Image: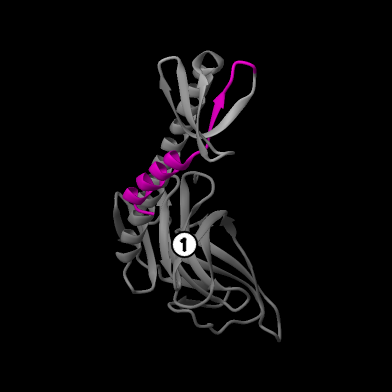
Amino acid sequence: MRPLAVLLAVALSLSAATVKLYLKDGGYHLVREYQVSGDRVRYYSIERREWEEIPLALVDLERTQAEVRARQERLRHEAEALAQEEQAERALREEIARVPQETGVYWIHGGQLKPLKQAESKVVTNKRRSVLRVLTPVPIVAGKATVELDGAASAYVVDTPVPEFYIRLAADERFGILRLTPKKDARVVQRWSIIPITQEIFEEHEEIEVFRLQVGEGLYKIWPKQPLSPGEYAVVEYTAGKGNIQVWDFAYRR
């Protein structure tokens, strides 16, 4: 609803509202409107659908006016809330329109969208290292493995404990934010337990609770439910149990 429509709706609500014309004996008349003229009050009766009059001395005018003012104030607040909501929705639509069509992760910062560079992650076992570049399985053997990023710290630093991101998915996969575990000259994204014969993978990772808002086909807005503590993190997209993962790393430093 546009602001003009909001104001029009409020005006119509006020004009069509039923007013309680309170009496000093505790009763009231339901009226569409009323007018004070000298020592008389003229009002349009909702019940009888006609204009009537009553002595002003019988009317609790102060209570009647107070209730009318309270309702007008409530309607004004509702109109302002609706207008703010519409403005926020319009800003979100404009922001979404700026998200590139390429799959990836984009940090929302200062009214701008800043792309995160996809990290070159590696599956590390006792015998080999395999580079993960896209969402395709890599040759693995039964046992233990880790998904790691080279370097002790990300070059990409966010300046807020509650960063907001857009992620445009490459496929219909799981996604979220993980906290990375420090390792000598590296950061661990996931730990894998690989089952013999079936080659099924059980992933272990520290997942951050996030809000997820779908805003388009394959496009989501995500942000942490709780402020992040300083450390190394990554937005990830992966297939559970299949050894597919894409990583966009970042750090938060107070």
Image quarter of residue 241: bottom right
Above or below, comparing residue 136 to residue 164 in the picture = below
Q: Within the magenta stretch, is there residue 161? A: no
Above or below, comparing residue 112 to residue 49 in the picture = below
* Residue denoted by label 1: 235
Q: Nearer the viewer, residue 6 or 86?
A: 6
Tell me what residue is drawn at x 35 percent, y 66 percent. 117
Report the quarter where the C terminus lies.
top left
What kind of element bears circle 1?
A: strand
Tell me what residue is drawn at x 32 percent, y 59 percent. 95
Q: Nearer the viewer, residue 3 or 160?
A: 3
Count of numbered labels shown in the rendering: 1
- The answer to whether residue 75 shows anywhere in this view is yes
Image check: 2 left or right of 207?
left
Image quarter of residue 37: top left
Which residue occupies the extreme bottom position in the image? 197
Image check: 253 left or right of 172?
left
Could you tell me residue 130's position as x and y percent? 49, 78
Could you tell me residue 125's position as x and y percent? 57, 73
- The answer to whether residue 151 shows anywhere in this view is no
Q: Within the magenta stretch, is there residue 22? A: yes
Could you tell me residue 232's position as x and y percent? 46, 53
Amino acid of disc 1? Val
Image check: 122 left or right of 105?
right
Q: Residues within 10 Å of mark 1 (few under 14, many from 20)?
A: many
State the extent of the magenta-drawn residues as a range: 1-25
Above or below, comparing residue 133 to residue 18 in the picture = below
Tell me what residue is drawn at x 50 percent, y 70 percent. 237
Q: Nearer the viewer, residue 39 or 77?
A: 39
Could you tell me residue 227's position as x and y percent? 50, 44
